[in-house]
Image: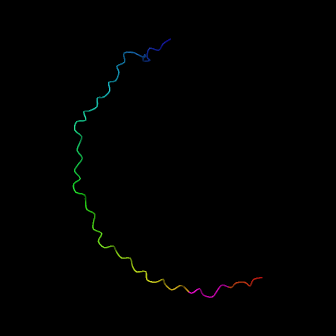
Amino acid sequence: MSDSTLPQPGGSAPLLTPTPMPEPGEPTPLPDPGEPTPLPDPGEPTPLPDPGGPGPLPSPGPPDEVPPPL
């Protein structure tokens, strides 16, 4: 018992013809970048603010109450 609706291998079904590739022709030229944009002149570096000497250390104050050693 054969089902006649199944495509038979090697049948007369037309093979799909591959789509022809378009001719490459001349490559599209890249746009001329022209002169590179010059970077802005940074000029003199901004001097860091003088930190000066270290600030006065905070007074440690009276020592915490230490229990006498046993």
Residue furthest to the top = 1
- In percent of width and height, residue 70 lies at 78, 82
Of 10 and 49, the residue lying toward us: 49
Q: Is residue 33 magenta?
A: no
Q: Quadrant of residue 9?
A: top left
For image coordinates 66% across by 84% down, the residue present is 64
Colour scheme in use = rainbow
Q: How many marks?
A: 0
Of 31 and 16, which appears nearest the observer? 31
Residue 28 relative to residue 48: left or right = left
Secondary structure mostly seen in the magenta stretch = loop
| Left or right: residue 45 compared with residue 25 | right
Queried whether the magenta region covers residue 62, the answer comes back as yes
Q: Look at the picture and state if 33 lies above or below 67.
A: above
Residue visible at 49% across and 84% down? 55
Q: Residue at x 70, y 84 (%)?
A: 66
Asked which quadrant contains residue 14, the reply is top left
Q: Is residue 31 above or below residue 40?
A: above
- Residue 32 percent coordinates (x, y): 22, 50
Numbered range of the magenta stretch: 59-64
Which quadrant of the view contains residue 68?
bottom right
